[in-house]
Image (spheres, grey):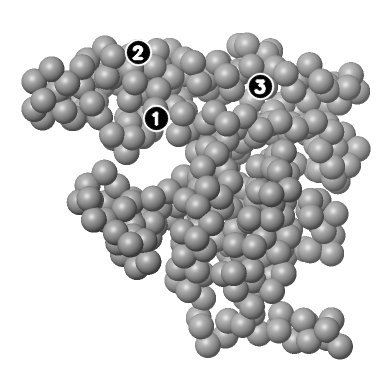
């Protein structure tokens, strides 16, 4: 009886896959494709009860709100840091993408970091159920990225993915629908932004916000020397005078600022390659390593990783969307891919 009822509910609902990221949340709706891509940011009133803004609108308010308004990123290092605010955010996004007349309770496939704890898994599942899900399935983000990138994960051969998101860098070696080796490093896009903030503060006595640091990273950030010099004006508060000021920075400076977090990503990639069995190593040597996530767009990162490891690194098509694309494939072909889910 329950199974039949579940099928009826499923017929009327619009099942979805979610990449619940530290920096951005993406939602894929069955038969509709990717319908939402917004920052994982919420603005609340002083009491924390009323939601004033979510997503893109909330991010634009970050660092610009008065004391009686709080701007929050409820995800940290790829997992839920604030359960209540995450619920509010997910509910807002679901309401935004769903026609409430046809929405009953959807099935959800949600991407989570490798090595997520049982407590963190429970938090994600509970949050999804609180937000209206009837059924929740979790998939490790690098597995979803591999599927989204079109890798042959079902075959008995080595496939390697490095997924650099906002809060974590996920490295996985996948074969025969399972992860032969996986590691989650809590150094990624956010840590790069903070490294830029620290560098500018130390070398220029200028205090800039993380939002501007992110813009600098996207515009002129690089991991490998560029053929053409890139420059950008940054604005902030002069730490000596206490007044607004600006400085001109170039790609060489930002590359120096990013050296430490990028080295951590190189190190975790090497560790994975040291653990791979010889037979899989041959496959990875022949086929290369897929780079996914927003961090894959750092200029020259693929070249630096190639220089450090001798392997070919391939940037996935539209790397920011590759995890939700893979989770959507699992949702659309659930009977075939159910075994890749971790819960």
Q: Quadrant of residue 43?
A: bottom left
Q: In the image shown, does 260 or 50 lie closer to the viewer?
A: 50
- Which residue occupies 81% across, 43% down? 153
Badge 2 is on which residue? 252
- Which residue occupies 33% across, 35% down? 210
Which of labels 2 and 1 is toward the front? Answer: 1
Q: Secondary structure at mark 2?
A: helix
Distance between the alpha carbons at the discs numbered 3 and 1: 19 Å
Q: Secondary structure at mark 1?
A: helix
Q: Quadrant of residue 178?
A: top right
- In the displayed structure, does residue 284 sit left or right of residue 306? right
Location of residue 18 in the rendering, given as x and y in whole percent from the top left corner: 60, 58
Distance between the alpha carbons at the discs numbered 2 and 3: 24 Å
Location of residue 120 in the rendering, given as x and y in whole percent from the top left corner: 66, 48
Q: Is residue 57 above or below residue 206?
A: below
Q: Secondary structure at mark 3?
A: helix
Badge 3 is on which residue? 268
- Which residue occupies 53% across, 56% down? 83
Badge 1 is on which residue? 193
Q: In the image shown, does 338 or 83 lie closer to the viewer?
A: 83
Sequence-wise, the earlier of marks 2 and 1 is: 1
- In the displayed structure, does residue 310 sit left or right of residue 5? left
Quarter in which the C terminus is drawn: bottom right
Q: Are marks 3 and 1 in contact (CB under 8 Å)?
A: no
Does residue 76 appear in the picture of this structure? yes
Q: Is residue 170 above or below residue 144?
A: above
- In the displayed structure, does residue 170 sit left or right of residue 209? right
Location of residue 68 in the rendering, given as x and y in whole percent from the top left corner: 23, 56
Q: Are marks 2 and 3 in contact (CB under 8 Å)?
A: no
Distance between the alpha carbons at the discs numbered 2 and 1: 16 Å
């Amino acid at each position: 009886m329950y199974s039949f009822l579940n099928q009826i509910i499923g017929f009327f609902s619009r099942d979805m896959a979610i990449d619940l990221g530290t920096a951005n949340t993406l939602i894929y709706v069955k038969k509709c494709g990717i319908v939402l891509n917004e920052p994982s940011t919420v603005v609340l009133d002083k009491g924390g009860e009323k939601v004033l803004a979510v997503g893109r609108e909330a991010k634009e308010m970050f660092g610009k709100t008065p004391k009686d308004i709080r701007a929050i990123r409820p995800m940290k290092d790829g997992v839920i840091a604030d359960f209540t605010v995450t619920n509010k955010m997910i509910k807002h996004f679901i309401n935004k993408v769903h026609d409430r007349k046809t929405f009953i309770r959807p099935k959800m496939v949600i991407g989570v970091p490798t090595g997520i704890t049982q407590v963190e898994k429970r938090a994600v599942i509970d949050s999804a159920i609180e937000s209206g899900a009837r059924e929740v399935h979790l998939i490790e983000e690098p597995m979803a990225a591999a599927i989204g990138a079109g890798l042959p994960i079902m075959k008995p051969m080595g496939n390697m993915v490095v997924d650099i998101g906002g809060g974590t860098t996920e490295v996985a070696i996948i074969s025969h629908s399972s992860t032969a080796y996986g590691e989650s490093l809590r150094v990624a896009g956010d840590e790069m932004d903070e490294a830029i903030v620290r560098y500018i503060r130390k070398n220029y006595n200028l205090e800039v916000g993380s939002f501007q640091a992110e813009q600098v990273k996207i515009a002129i950030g690089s991991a490998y020397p560029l053929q053409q010099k890139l420059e950008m004006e940054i604005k902030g508060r002069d730490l000596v005078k206490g007044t607004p000021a600006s400085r001109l920075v170039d790609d060489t400076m930002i590359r120096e600022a990013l050296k430490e977090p990028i080295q951590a990503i190189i190190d975790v990639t090497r560790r994975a390659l040291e653990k791979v069995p010889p037979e899989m190593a041959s496959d990875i040597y022949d086929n290369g390593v897929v780079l996914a996530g927003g961090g894959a767009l750092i200029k020259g990162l693929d070249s630096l990783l190639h220089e450090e490891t001798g392997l070919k690194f391939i940037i996935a098509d539209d790397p920011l969307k590759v995890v939700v694309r893979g989770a959507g494939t699992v949702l659309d072909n659930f009977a075939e891919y159910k075994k890749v889910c971790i819960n």
